[in-house]
Amino acid sequence: MDDGMRAMIREAYQSQMESHSDLRRKTDEHRAEHGCTAYPSPNSALWSFLLAMTGARRCLEIGCGLGYNAAVLAEALGPGGTVHTIENDPTHADLAEAELARRGLAGRVQVLRGDAAEILRTLEVPYDMVFIDGGDAHDWAFAAKRLVRDGGFVVSPNEGEVLAEWKLQIPNTAFVFVRPAPDL
């Protein structure tokens, strides 16, 4: 990405980039202290654009961590939007629920506790966006096929090859591989 594009994105999405930055820092500190795999997405400021472009109202996140990505998704969707986020680690789920409540987002974000494979089998509502940020993306291929609406999209910061394979299996769905970018 060239400097001009970076500047344009920074100007257009500055408020989203700063939104929940304290939770992003808390997540980074928690990961460093506990050695876990909770990573806030470095590209979450762009979600507002993707969600607005598709008229999204419902998002599913696999891998909640401390709730940073879910908070950004909920904010990008606006008051009528809903985020379901799956977390297997009870400590992370507790921390995420507390942070989301503190930010006034508890009514728009539901933390689904437990094994993602089990939870994904129970979900019925088609989602506009599925954000895969936990586990092995290969595990979620069939769930994504069933849960993403036509015209919806799947986003992952770390599974580009898998998403390319899925494109052949799930027509009418956009796949966005978001390579972690330098700070905007």
Image (cartoon, rainbow, N blue to C red):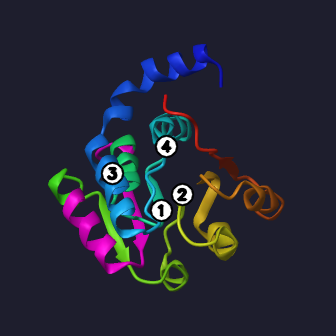
Name the residue located 25 percent from the left edge and 72 percent from the top edge: 94
Q: Nearer the viewer, mark 2 or mark 4?
A: 4
Q: Earlier in the sequence, mark 2 or mark 3?
A: 3
The disc label shown at residue 146, or none: none
Mark 4 belongs to which amino acid? Pro
Q: Which residue is mark 1?
A: 61
Q: CA distance from mark 1 to mark 2?
A: 5 Å
> In the rendered structure, which segment of residues is drawn in magenta?
77-100
Of the 4 image quadrants, the one containing the N terminus is top right
Contact check, label 1 and label 3, Cβ < 8 Å: no
Type of the residue with mark 3: Ala
At mark 2, the secondary structure is strand
Mark 4 is surrounded, within 10 Å at the Cα level, by few (under 14), some (14 to 19) or many (20 or more) other residues, namely some
Say which residue appears at 47% left-offset and 62% top-offset. 61
Q: Are marks 1 and 2 in contact (CB under 8 Å)?
A: yes
Q: Earlier in the sequence, mark 1 or mark 3?
A: 1
- Does residue 53 sit above or below 68 in this rendering? above
Query: Where residue 11 sits: x, y (%)?
Result: 43, 18
x, y (%) of residue 62? 50, 67
- Judging by the rendered image, the residue that carries numbered circle 4 is 42
Residue assigned mark 3: 71
